[in-house]
Image (cartoon, helix red, strand yellow):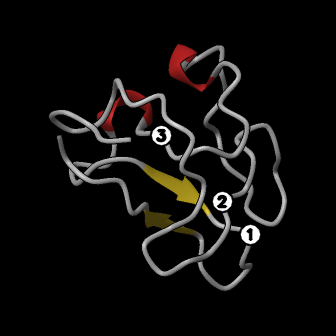
Amino acid sequence: DCYYGEGVGYHGNINVTKSGISCQPWSSQCPHHHYHNSTQYPELINASNFCRNPGGMGPDGPWCYTTNKLVRWEYCDVPKC
């Protein structure tokens, strides 16, 4: 798995952050409430809890909301191609 540019087109299966925290499913609002949905961001369709960069919001690549309620989000350990 690797990404190009800002990672908007990344559709891999990595689902942990750089610090090793599991990603929260994009369809879940727990533990972190957010407004990223597959209607607004089609790249989140079937995204499960995989690292993504919806709308290119993360200039440093794919990221996710975490399952740790003390850490809202983090970049993922996805290498650039």
Residue 42 spot, x, y in % from top left: 55, 14
Residues tagged 2 and 3 counted as in contact (Cβ below 8 A): no
Residues tagged 1 and 2 counted as in contact (Cβ below 8 A): yes
Residue at point 81%, 51% (across, down): 29
**Which circle's residue, 1 or 2, is located before the other in the chain?**
2
Residue 66 spot, x, y in % from top left: 64, 66
- Number of marks in the image? 3
Instruction: Indicate which disc residue 23 carries.
Output: 2
Circle 1 packing at 10 Å, graded few (<14), some (14-19), many (20+), is: some
Residue at point 67%, 67% (across, down): 22
Instruction: Indicate which disc residue 59 carries.
Output: none
Alpha-carbon distance for marks 2 and 3?
Answer: 10 Å
Residue under label 1? 67
Residue type pointed to by label 3: Arg
- Whether residue 79 sits left or right of residue 38 in the image: it is left
Residue 11 sits above or below residue 40 on the image:
below
**Which circle's residue, 2 or 3, is located before the other in the chain?**
2
Residue 65: quarter of image: bottom right
Residue at point 44%, 33% (across, down): 54
Residue type pointed to by label 2: Cys
Alpha-carbon distance for marks 1 and 3?
Answer: 15 Å
Residue under label 3? 52
Question: Element under label 3?
Answer: loop
Residues tagged 1 and 3 counted as in contact (Cβ below 8 A): no
Instruction: From the viewer's side, name the closer residue of 54 and 49.
Output: 49
Circle 3 packing at 10 Å, graded few (<14), some (14-19), many (20+), is: many
Question: Element under label 1?
Answer: loop
Instruction: From the viewer's side, name the closer residue of 7 and 27.
Output: 7
Residue 69 sits above or below residue 9 on the image:
below
Image quarter (top left, top right, bottom left or bottom right) of the C terminus = top left
Residue type pointed to by label 1: Thr
- Whether residue 58 sits left or right of residue 41 in the image: it is left
